[in-house]
């Protein structure tokens, strides 16, 4: 366990992604520092997953470039791990085999280590079908952690969980990120989740970054505080009403 930053610097430069005549990303620029936790918010269909997929190397941008630690890359599959809303586990493989998928034989020990990180060390030999939804997402998280990723790409991974499990998973994610300091991009529809977890929040609007906001509240975030509630409210208003564009005092330069 280490507190040194393992994450990468990521620069997205003038990124375009079009599907036919629909220009979803329109010259999007963002710089993400090593070890930063960034949430990506925006209205349904604004291009959040499109951005994540381009960064993951799962789809080819129409134009633009990606830089990791100052080196240009096409796709960055090798250092990134992606987690989706569905756990995407293989039902015929045991939990530890799901976690170790694609790794070398001796990685069984590592798979068990990753499972213990997410509190499922004692469920390694079971089949996914008997796990709860939250436990399955923990397995998916362990599978992402097992290869010690330097970039974690999370596409609404907690979206299908009940409210309590979701808060538990948020806290687990925050703890693991604080210990391992992988650079994290989290897509979420839940502004409260974004404010609870992120160093920075970006809003995608009209194919570009419509808002880039540093969240300076101390951790762990006090969800019951007036400051927290006011920020959530302010961001929600901004997300829902692009034309209003209120002034944010701590908007990133
Ligand atoms: N493979 C594809 N072919 C055609 N259009 C696509 C494809 N993938 C995404 N799109 C379109 O691009 C737009 C952005 O989709 P994307 O999934 O990135 O949105 P999103 O912000 O993640 O939405 P949501 O919050 O609803 O998940 C949508 O209009 C979608 O229909």
Image (tube, helix red, strand yellow):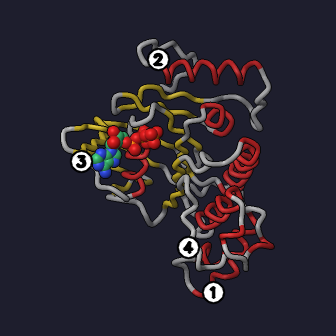
For residue 193, side relative to residue 241 (left or right): right
Q: Secondary structure at mark 4?
A: loop
- Determine which of the numbered discs, if any, sits on residue 120 in the image: none
Reading the chain from its start, which is encountered first: label 1 or label 3?
A: 3
Residue that badge 1 annotates: 106
Q: Nearer the viewer, mark 4 or mark 3?
A: 4
Residue that badge 4 annotates: 90
Q: Secondary structure at mark 1?
A: helix
Q: Contact (CB < 8 A) between labels 4 and 1?
A: no
Residue that badge 3 annotates: 62
- The Cα–Cα distance between marks 4 and 1, rounded to whole angstroms, is 20 Å
Q: Residues within 10 Å of mark 1 (few under 14, many from 20)?
A: few
Q: Nearer the viewer, mark 4 or mark 1?
A: 4
Q: Secondary structure at mark 3?
A: loop
- Determine which of the numbered discs, if any, sits on residue 241 in the image: 2
Q: Nearer the viewer, mark 4 or mark 2?
A: 4
Query: Looking at the image, which residue is at 76% across and 18% down?
Result: 226
For residue 34, side relative to residue 112 (left or right): left
Ligand 1 is located in which of the four quadrants? top left
Query: Looking at the image, which residue is at 25% across and 43% down?
Result: 18
Query: Looking at the image, which residue is at 47% across and 26% down?
Result: 211
- The Cα–Cα distance between marks 3 and 2, rounded to whole angstroms, is 29 Å
Where in the figure is residue 33, as x and y percent of width and height? 52, 44
């Amino acid at each position: 366990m280490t507190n040194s930053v393992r994450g990468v610097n990521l620069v997205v430069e003038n990124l375009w992604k079009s599907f036919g005549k629909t220009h979803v990303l329109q010259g999007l620029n963002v710089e993400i520092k090593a070890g930063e936790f960034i949430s990506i918010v925006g209205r349904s269909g604004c291009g959040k997953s499109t951005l994540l997929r381009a960064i993951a190397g799962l789809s080819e941008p129409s134009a633009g470039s990606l830089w990791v630690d100052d080196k240009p890359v096409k796709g960055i599959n090798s250092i990134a791990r992606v987690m989706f809303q569905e756990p995407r586990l293989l039902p015929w493989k045991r939990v530890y085999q799901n976690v170790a998928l694609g790794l070398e034989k001796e990685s069984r020990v590592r798979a068990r280590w990753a499972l213990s990180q997410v509190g499922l060390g004692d469920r390694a030999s079971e089949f996914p079908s008997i796990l709860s939804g939250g436990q399955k997402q923990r397995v998916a998280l362990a599978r992402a952690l097992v290869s010690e990723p330097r970039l974690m790409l999370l596409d609404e991974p907690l979206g299908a969980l009940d409210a309590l499990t979701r808060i538990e998973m948020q806290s687990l994610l925050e703890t693991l990120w604080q210990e391992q300091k992988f650079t994290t991009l989290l897509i979420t529809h839940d502004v409260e989740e974004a404010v609870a977890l992120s160093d920075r929040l970006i809003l995608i609007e009209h194919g570009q970054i419509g808002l880039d906001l540093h969240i300076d509240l101390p951790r762990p975030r006090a969800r019951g505080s007036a400051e927290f509630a006011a920020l959530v409210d302010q961001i929600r208003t901004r997300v829902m009403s692009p034309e209003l564009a209120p002034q944010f005092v701590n908007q990133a330069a």
